[in-house]
Image (cartoon, rainbow, N blue to C red):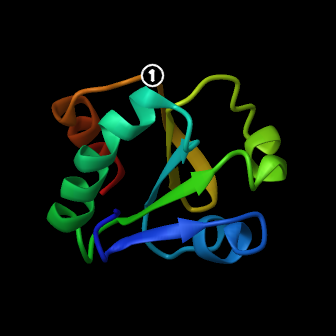
Amino acid sequence: MAAENVQTFSDDNFETEVLKSETPVLVDFWAEWCQPCKMLGPVIDELATEYDGKIKVGKLDIDSNQTSAMNFQITAIPSILIFKDGEVQNRAVGLKSKGDLQAMLNEAI
């Protein structure tokens, strides 16, 4: 179960919540069947809490939102994309450490 400050992104709200966001956004592209995605979940929750108010954090299920996944060329999951001013600023593919993701987020602030 995701932390209360982890948002759920979808094809329907992606433009509004991510691309037009005034703050940087971390998007975790994941799927329910992906074991590494499940392992990364608690880290995403911790980051959402630590960066609350500075960076928007959310998850996008690629099985239910294939358009967004295709638009950003998601070919492996988990994939973490950091958006700033509507553009992808940074990308990480595969299971990453909390420290690696913190470094990416700190660049976006």
Q: Is residue 24 above or below residue 106?
A: below
Residue 102 at x, y percent in the picture: 22, 42
Q: Is residue 18 left or right of residue 78?
A: right
Question: Which quadrant: the C terminus?
Answer: bottom left
The residue tagged with tag 1: helix, strand or loop? loop
Residue 58 at x, y percent in the picture: 46, 62
Front-most of 35 and 57? 35
Residue shown at 22%/64% (left/top)? Answer: 51
Residue shown at 60%/74% (left/top)? Answer: 17
Q: Where is mark 1, residue-wise?
A: 94
Location of residue 3 by image quarter: bottom left
Q: Is residue 80 above or below residue 3?
A: above
Question: Which quadrant: the N terminus?
Answer: bottom left
Q: Is residue 11 left or right of residue 108?
A: right
Mark 1, residues whose alpha carbon is within 10 Å: few (<14), some, or many (≥20)? Answer: few
Residue shown at 32%/75% (left/top)? Answer: 5
Q: Is residue 7 above or below residue 97?
A: below
State how many labels appear. 1
Give the residue type that dot 1 points to. Gly
Q: Is residue 16 left or right of residue 3?
A: right
Residue 9 at x, y percent in the picture: 60, 66
Residue that lies at the very extreme toward the front in this rendered image: 33
Q: Is residue 23 left or right of residue 105?
A: right
Residue 30 at x, y percent in the picture: 55, 42
Residue shown at 31%/26% (left/top)? Answer: 96
